[in-house]
Image: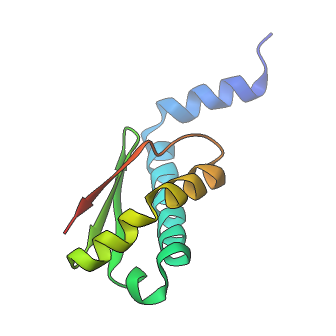
Amino acid sequence: MEHLGKILALQRRASPVLRNVSSAMLLEYANRAISSWVGVENSKLARALHFQDGTLIVGCLNSDTTQAVRLQENEIRNEINRRVGKEAVKKIRYLT
C-alpha cells in the first residue's frame, strides 16, 4: 500500500493546474523576498515575472535596480527556496 503523500505528490507533478498555482505562489514569494532584501523603492522597479525549470526571470526597469537585486541574489534565492521547502530556484535571470 502506497503512502497518501506520495500519491498526492505524483498528482501535483502531473496536474498543469497545480503546477501553475505553485508557480504563482513562487512568484509571490519572490516578490516578497525582493522587497525585503533590496528595499521598497527598488522593489517597485523589479518584479518576478516567470518561473520555469528552476529559473526565475526578474524584470527590472533600469540597470541600477538590476545591480541591487543581483547583489542580493543568493539571499533572495535562499529565502524563496526556504519558503517553498525545496530547492526550486536554481538560478535567476534578469530582463532590463
* Residue 49 in the image, given as x and y percentages of width and height: 33, 63
- Vertical comparison of 8 with 57: above or below: above
**Number of numbered tags placed on the structure image:** 0
Corner quadrant of residue 33: bottom right
* The residue positioned farthest toward the bottom in the image shown: 41
**Can the viewer see residue 89 in this picture?**
yes
| Residue 92 appears left or right of 22 | left
* The residue positioned farthest toward the front in the image shown: 71
* Residue 21 in the image, given as x and y percentages of width and height: 50, 53
Q: Give the residue drawn at x 44%, y 49%.
A: 20
Q: Quadrant of the C terminus?
A: bottom left
Q: State the colouring used for the structure image.
A: rainbow
* Residue 15 in the image, given as x and y percentages of width and height: 48, 36
- Vertical comparison of 36 with 90: above or below: below
Q: Give the residue drawn at x 76%, y 14%.
A: 2
Q: Give the residue drawn at x 47%, y 46%.
A: 89
| Residue 36 appears left or right of 60 | right
Q: Give the residue drawn at x 46%, y 65%.
A: 72
